Image (cartoon, rainbow, N blue to C red):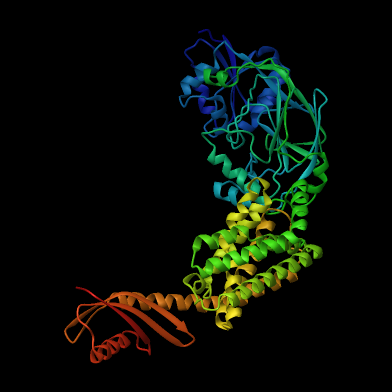
Amino acid sequence: MTYFSTAYFIYNDDSKYLIEDMESNEFGTEITSYNIDYFIVNIKNISQYIKHIVVSVPEDDIARIFDIAYKYDMSIGIVPISSSKNLIKNLHTSNNIKENIELSLRDDCKPIDLLNINGNIVYSQSIIGEVPLFGEKLNHIKSSFLKTIIYSIKKFFSIKLQKFEITTKNGQKIVTAGSSVKILNHNSKGFITNLFDFKHSMRDGKITALIISPYSVYEYIQLLTSIFQNYKKKKSLPKSIGYIQSESLTIEASSSKTITIDNDKKINLPIECQIIPDAIKLNASEKYWIENEKVTSTKETVKTSNLPDANETTKYISEHIPFITSASEERFKELFQILRNDAKTNKTYIILMILSTLLASFGLFANSTAVIIGAMLVAPLMIPIVSISMGLLRADSNIISDSLIKIGIGIFVALFASSMLSFLLPNFELTDEMTSRINPTLLDLGVAILSGIAAAYSKSFKEIAQNLAGVAIAVALVPPLAVAGIGLGYGEIYTFLGAFLLFFTNLVGIIIAAVITFWLLGFSSVVKSKKSVAFVFALLVAVSFPLYISYDNMIEKYKMVKMIKTHRFIVNNKYIIVDSANVILQGDIKILNLELLVRESLNKKDLETLNIKIQRLFNEKIFIKTQMEYIL
């Protein structure tokens, strides 16, 4: 290995301790040492003597050193100071000072490109606009990582998109909206490079411009988290990011007036970015040259499919980005037209309502879960409920009125059909499938809310719209209406009210959940029909009270059953086992149905004693019905 015969060592106060090591190096290089301030001020006078410099200065001064090296045709070796962590990463330097000195004095420098922006040499990066946590250096808040995070999170909510016009060397013009453009030359180690795998080198003759365009604060946070998720596994271009690689770029912005270079220097926009190929010669490690391989292709790369196009740009600029992403115009129009059609009543809807109700009613009378599920698949009642949710969100009176009419007709048809069927089958008693739908609880409200979320989400994406049938099965809208109609037909008001409460719970739960889901999916920045949604929400709160009471009763029944089943009774030396227990609440009356296992028959005295023992367990009046089976 050959070394320079002479070199100049440029240091600052943090690195002057290296002067002795440099000047007494074992490679035969004669060293002259200059403080960086003296070097910069006197460069014109001393430049004729200098061919190779070794610098050990803060990273913020590297761009000035590169500029001087380019103007005065000097080669460079770098011995990073300990505080220049990014520089150490980028150069892949050793922690051993002597090894770094040896590398910096080698006479085998290779050329690298430099980035010139409006006549200014850039070392690390240039940023237009706001880009929290993506390379912004926050000197003004004095430092800690936690403070940086807090500061950046606050800035999330003030981000605005602006219009960018970018023209490449080949004349391709890109008009888009973004929060920022980040211009890179060197292969920086940081957040951006962890996002995706893109070819980038100090010797490729290209400028890389990354356009960051989050449609919402939530999307920006997703972008940040994807950095950590994909740190080791690079993937394709993430959402909200576009990038351009070209030999030169012209950039204009609608809001930003300046571009920040290397974290501190500001230059007025518009800007001309030029790559200077093979501008200076640098000493660097073998790993650095592998990472920055020489590339001679002049082909441009433009990937902006994740960004707003020229037609959409005006929709996004000048306002703070919302917390939730707005749906695209195309997606919104397509869904809105579908829901507008779904809200209209037609013959098919009425026929399906009749068929699904009759099918559900037969399933209820037959106590057949399979038949009832078949009825849920046929039932079309979920469709207008999803439509009215969008109508409430967007304050579209036509969709709201059409949906209300369609829902009202569906309710009437279901009640009429099921009550008529009950007249034809007058001798049937209420089955388990019927009684299970006359005591709704808060659990049913939870099912309704989750079903509303699933319904709105399924309807929003045509590729999963077929899942709406599965949602209809989960929430079961028609079977409760069928039970309510059967209750009407039998004249049992308790059955009608309980089943209709379950249906109404499903109805308001789905509507509220679907409205919120459509809003979160970005189909409206705000809920426009606030009064109507508030009214539905008030209904949801109102219906929650009887559901809570019913849920509380369910818990009470569970506790009673658990208590009675854990006891073993001995009555007059007769051993009695509780095989099963069930509690029925009829107003204030509690009826305990027991199935008992006994070896001997129980007489009247035995039953009276058993009744006393059971009553003591609950400290309240319980009506007890028993059925006995004998163990041989």
Among the 4 quarters of the image, the one containing residue 128: top right
- Pick whichever, 434 or 463, lies toward us: 434
Q: In this rendering, is residue 93 above or below 608?
A: above
Is residue 477 at all visible to an observer of this figure? no
Q: Position of residue 81 (x, y in %)?
A: 54, 30
**Residue 589 image offset from top left, x and y in percent:** 44, 87
Q: Nearer the viewer, residue 514 or 564?
A: 564
Left or right of 7 on screen, residue 27: left
Which quarter of the rendering shows the C terminus? Answer: bottom left
Left or right of 288, for residue 350 = right
* Residue 491 seen in the figure: yes
Residue 630: image quadrant is: bottom left
Image vertical order of residue 370 relative to residue 548, above or below: above
Image coords of residue 303 (percent x, y): 71, 31
Q: What percent of the width, then of the height, locates residue 61?
A: 65, 30
Please tell me whether residue 354 is drawn above or below residue 121 in the rendered image: below
